[in-house]
Amino acid sequence: MTPIRPLQRHRRLLASLLVLGLVAPALTACGKAPTGDVPVRIGYSAWPGWIPWKVTEDQGLFKAAGVPVSLQWFDGYLDSIQALNAGQLDCNSQTLNDTISSISGGADLQVVLTNDNSTGNDQVIVAPGIKSVQDLKGKKVAAEEGTVDHYLLLLGLKKAGMTPDSVTFVPLETGAAAAAFVAGKVDAVGVFAPFTTEALKRPGSTTLFSSKEFPGAISDHLVCRSEFVKQHPEQIQKIVNSWFATLQQIKAQPGPSLAILAKRAGVSEAEYKAYDAGTRIFTLAENQQAMKPGSTMQSLPYAAQQISTFLQQVGLAKTPPKLDGLLNPQFVDAAK
């Protein structure tokens, strides 16, 4: 599979401690929220659960919903997070994990929509001879430090009764981590698609575990600045409505929609379709259910608490995030 070209940098920075210095400027430099015909600024980057926004734009669904939008593509996912925290975006496509990390750093954000869950596109891939998580003890494991694939590795170790110190962690950018694994410089690697395909080019390598084994652990969302949500709830509602109209459009016209998705991703249509199994797009009903309290990771309130605790335990969040008001269900509850 040909890698998605824009993914040569960070997809999803979990421990966004780098944005700590950007939060204070965001509080003073975010400027006035859009009014009237000024477009709502929405960021997105190369992840299968977010690329459908391109269909929304190209098919005129924002306009049909009655909301002007400036949809901004970011080659680097980290750049989109920084732009949101600096007030250069009104909303951004990002993970729950990264959103909680930003809140830990002082950002004031709200989750207004769930795009998808990762259900296999994040993987820990191992060299021949490694058959179990216990076999990783003492081995060199590479991943991009602070990303959700680092988080996935830590979840796998914890499930097996191991600690982060059980392995020799090698922090490398995702592309470099995959390359180091293929070259035999490390024994295992945590990567996301399409770098999973690259890593599996090492002869005899296999996927030890993936996000499929941890349902709800990696969720992807539309996240907005709380100030903007408060000032313009009607615009947020129209944007959420346009997302569900987009899902209907993709279902009704799969061929033309796939062409748009693949072009934006920079891959062939056949290659793009390979991502389907590893990303589960949420329906409206699933969105509404996810916002409700529960006792599993399928419940966002529960997941947020668990992720917050976990990030603090492993040192990826230095201060306890304030989760009150993080999840705003009003827009999916009222979605058409």
Image (spheres, grey):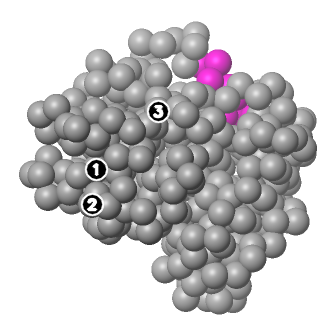
Evaluate if marks 1 and 3 touch, with contact meaning CB atoms under 8 Å apart. no
Query: How far from the left and from the top, in percent, is residue 22?
Result: 56, 84
Q: Which residues are magenta?
A: 240-249
Residue plotted at (64% across, 71% down): 313
Residue plotted at (72% across, 65% down): 309
- In the picture, measured across the screen, residue 326 lies left or right of residue 202, that is right
The residues bearing labels 3 and 2 have C-alpha atoms spaced at a distance of 22 Å
Of residues 258 and 67, the one drawn nearer to the viewer in this rendering:
258
Q: Is residue 333 magenta?
A: no
Q: Residue flagged by tag 3: what amino acid is it?
A: Gly
Q: Read off the residue under disc 2.
A: 140
Total count of labels: 3
Check disc 3: other Cα within 10 Å, few if <14, some if 14-19, many if 20+.
many
Check disc 1: other Cα within 10 Å, few if <14, some if 14-19, many if 20+.
many
Q: Read off the residue under disc 3.
A: 120
Report the mark closest to the observer, 1 or 3: 1
Q: Is residue 221 above or below residue 298?
A: below
- Which secondary structure, mark 3? loop
- Which secondary structure, mark 2? strand
